[in-house]
Image (cartoon, grey):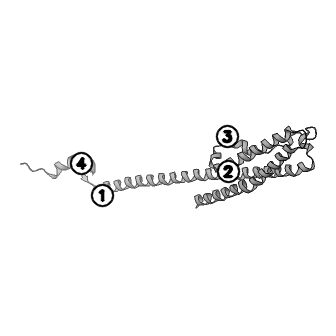
Amino acid sequence: MRFISGRAIAKPFRFLSIGGKPNLEFWFTQAVILLSTMLGVYLASFAGFEIAVNFDRYQRLSDARNLEISLRAEVSDNITKVEQWAISYKDGPMLWHDSRFAPRESYKLDDVIWLTMRNSSTTFELAPETLTSIRRFYSAVEQNKTVLFQQTQSNALAKKAIKNMALVAKEARTEILDKMDDDIVRLDAELKKVLD
């Protein structure tokens, strides 16, 4: 059997040598640099992904909070309006029944935020129970206003409709606004948690 020299074995690994002499230290250093770069890229991309996810979550929570605050202000104003309508009916019922004294449009709820929410994906970030309660409040007020406007004078139907409106406003003040306040506090806590 023929003896194979060290030179014959080294020929296939010529690319590992510099100037014909093997240089393992150089290649070890290159391997460490390559692995460090790969690890650095992985860690940086993971950190970037986490930051992007947290930013998106913060943005959604912030949008939901701002929408809820705006909607709460609108609903609160509308509740106050309905309460004032109920009080003012006793003093001048014909303002409701005779369109010559006051146009029907003067008895309209503000619903800019409510209508605008239909085109926002943030709407469904709000609690469904709150949205349902607000929808029912607006619907009940509109139904009772319709009954009032159909009467030509103050009668039992008109008095019952105005009484129902006052009752709906009272329930909305205690139920809807309290729920919305709790939701806003919850969203504030979640926003704080994202920032920490």
Any part of residue 40 in sight: yes
Residue 25 numbered tag: 1
**Do the CB atoms of the residues marked 4 and 2 lie less than 8 Å apart?**
no
Separation of residues labelled 2 and 3 (CA atoms)? 18 Å
- Disc 1 to disc 4: CB gap under 8 Å: no
Place of residue 105 in the rendered image (x, y in percent of width and height, measured from the top left): 85, 40
- The disc labelled 2 sits on which kind of residue? Thr
Badge 2: residue crowd in 10 Å (few <14, some 14–19, many ≥20): some
Residue 165 spot, x, y in % from top left: 80, 48
Q: Is residue 63 visible?
A: no
Neighbor class of circle 4 (other Cα within 10 Å; few <14, some 14-19, many 20+) is few
User: What is the CA distance from the residue labelled 4 to the residue labelled 2?
Assistant: 73 Å
Q: Residue at x 79, y 52 (%)?
A: 167
Residue at the spot 75% in from the left edge and 54% down from the top edge: 171
Q: Earlier in the sequence, mark 4 or mark 2?
A: 4
In terms of sequence position, does the residue under pointer 1 or pointer 2 come before the other? 1
Please give the residue where the numbered disc 2 appears in the rendered image: 130
SS label for mark 1:
helix
